[in-house]
């Protein structure tokens, strides 16, 4: 992504950086963009330039379909088709139309990162990428969506965002036909089919399909949370988590379901939500065949088969398959009960416990027997009931080998035998 940004922006940067000096030489008053303050020699230039802030790419190449925000960028681009790409990398053979693009590309091989952030010290191979990175620290977001008002630190992110409104998904998976608004997301998606996980943690050896997931994972080992909410001070391991978290304070939920109208704060949440309408369950367990609507549910489910319990209580050493179960377990030690019933005021230590408790007041019974139609407020009650129909008795007495449909029946039986 960094190299792509460099190559896309190099032509603009090369020509624009000398504009102020040229104007001074000939004594012309310059016109400035009121968003990014870039100077221009003619009054109409800033108006045309502002299209880059709005994310508009109305000029399309009729040869390769690449889009641009200004006609002169398209004209310059078309020369690459006529002139070709005479500058070749002697390491990997990749070709470029400009020698400075080749110079920047070679840093991929050499690892050279000559541009350093004076705030956090992070280094980059491209100057324009450093400029974009600095906006993390300054909070600057000069590119604004004219439909919903959301702002972005990069013009490419605005262009991609606008596809939420237009519904455009130009990138298609040639295996399952699924479409995406971003090429990078398509590449990541394809790894679901291939099983490829090219990013490896050098501490614990765990592998990931996405580089940013590896970066976030490493913070588990280091405990580092470098990104902070400037409203409440909460810290996060990813800058994207801060953006999503801030929507709690602002109340902005930009992703809306076109079926039921529900709004959510993340695009992946919208995709997951829509599956409640379509019934789609694209994630399948390769052990038992059970299907799930989200990949995280499949990951948690597989631990039933593997017995893996990666979340450990640091007080009593009990382990759990899910992080939220560990969080709720810790309330046993602290005595904390943060979930309160708004009907009777009762407090509980877990959100799932509150949900179940509320059914006492509402009378809701969401679990239905598909044999006799009887309904239950708890899933475990439905499971016990179904055994009446199936005759299943999974609880076995290790003394006399007698079987029971419920564990409580087995415990009662054992008490009679021992007495």
Image (cartoon, rainbow, N blue to C red):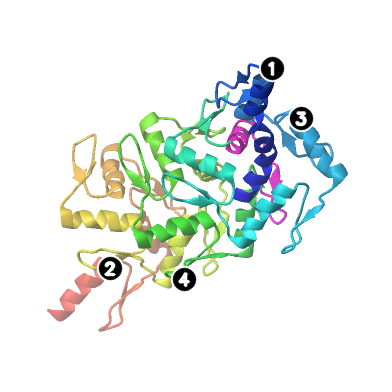
- Precedes in sequence: disc 2 or disc 3: 3
* Outermost bottom residue: 399
**Residue 157 within the magenta-colored segment of the rendering:** yes
Give yes or no for contact between labels 1 and 3 (Cβ–Cβ under 8 Å): no
**201 left or right of 43?**
left
Quote the CA–CA distance across marks 1 and 3.
14 Å
**314 left or right of 379?**
left
Q: Residue at x 37, y 55 (%)?
A: 382
- Precedes in sequence: disc 1 or disc 2: 1
- Precedes in sequence: disc 4 or disc 1: 1
Quote the CA–CA distance across marks 1 and 2.
80 Å
User: Which of the image's four quarters has the C terminus?
Assistant: bottom left
First to last magenta residue range: 155-178
Q: Residue at x 16, y 75 (%)?
A: 415
Front label number (4 vs 1): 1
Locate residue 21: give its quadrant: top right
Q: Residue 72 got which mark?
A: 3
Q: Which residue is mark 4?
A: 205
- Viewer-closest of 256 and 70: 70
- Viewer-closest of 333 and 181: 181
Q: x, y percentage for residue 110?
A: 61, 61
Label 4's element? loop
Q: Which residue is mark 1?
A: 44
Q: Is residue 267 above or below residue 123?
A: above
Q: Which residue is mark 2?
A: 407
Q: Label 3: few (<14), some or many (≥20) within 10 Å?
A: few
Q: Is residue 167 above or below residue 289?
A: above
Q: x, y percentage for residue 258?
A: 57, 32
């Amino acid at each position: 992504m960094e190299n792509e940004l460099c190559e896309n922006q190099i032509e603009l940067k090369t020509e624009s950086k000398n504009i102020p000096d040229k104007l001074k030489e000939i004594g012309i008053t310059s016109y400035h963009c009121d968003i990014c303050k870039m100077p221009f020699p003619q009054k109409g230039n800033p108006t045309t330039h502002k299209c880059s802030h709005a994310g508009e790419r109305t000029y399309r190449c009729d040869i390769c379909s690449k889009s641009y925000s200004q006609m002169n960028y398209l004209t310059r681009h078309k020369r690459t088709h006529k002139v070709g790409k005479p500058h070749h990398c002697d390491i990997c053979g990749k070709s470029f139309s400009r020698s400075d693009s080749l110079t920047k590309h070679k840093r991929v091989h050499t690892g050279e990162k000559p541009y350093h952030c004076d705030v956090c010290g992070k280094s980059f191979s491209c100057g324009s990428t450093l400029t974009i990175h600095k906006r993390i620290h300054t909070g600057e977001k000069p590119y604004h969506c004219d439909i919903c008002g959301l702002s972005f630190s990069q013009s490419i992110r605005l262009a991609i965002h606008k596809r939420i409104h237009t519904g455009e998904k130009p990138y298609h998976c040639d295996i399952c036909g699924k479409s995406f608004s971003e090429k990078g997301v398509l590449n990541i998606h394809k790894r679901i089919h291939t099983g490829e996980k090219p990013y490896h943690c050098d501490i614990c050896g765990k592998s990931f399909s996405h580089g940013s997931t590896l970066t976030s994972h490493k913070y588990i080992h280091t405990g580092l949370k470098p990104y902070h909410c400037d409203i409440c001070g909460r810290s996060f391991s990813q800058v994207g988590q801060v953006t999503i978290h801030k929507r709690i304070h602002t109340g902005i939920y930009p992703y809306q379901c076109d079926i039921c109208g529900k709004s959510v704060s993340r695009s992946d949440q919208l995709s997951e939500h829509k599956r409640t309408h379509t019934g789609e369950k694209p994630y399948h367990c390769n052990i038992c065949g059970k299907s799930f609507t989200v990949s995280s549910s499949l990951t948690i489910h597989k631990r039933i088969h593997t017995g893996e319990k990666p979340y450990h209580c640091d007080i009593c050493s009990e382990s759990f398959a899910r992080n939220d179960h560990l969080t709720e377990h810790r309330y046993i030690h602290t005595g904390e009960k943060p979930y309160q019933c708004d009907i009777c005021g009762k407090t509980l230590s877990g959100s799932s416990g509150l949900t179940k408790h509320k059914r006492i007041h509402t009378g809701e019974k969401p679990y239905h027997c598909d044999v006799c139609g009887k309904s239950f407020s708890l899933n475990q009650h439905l499971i016990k009931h179904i055994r009446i129909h199936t005759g299943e008795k999974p609880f076995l007495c290790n003394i006399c080998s007698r079987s029971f449909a419920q564990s409580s029946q087995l415990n009662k039986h054992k008490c009679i035998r021992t007495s």
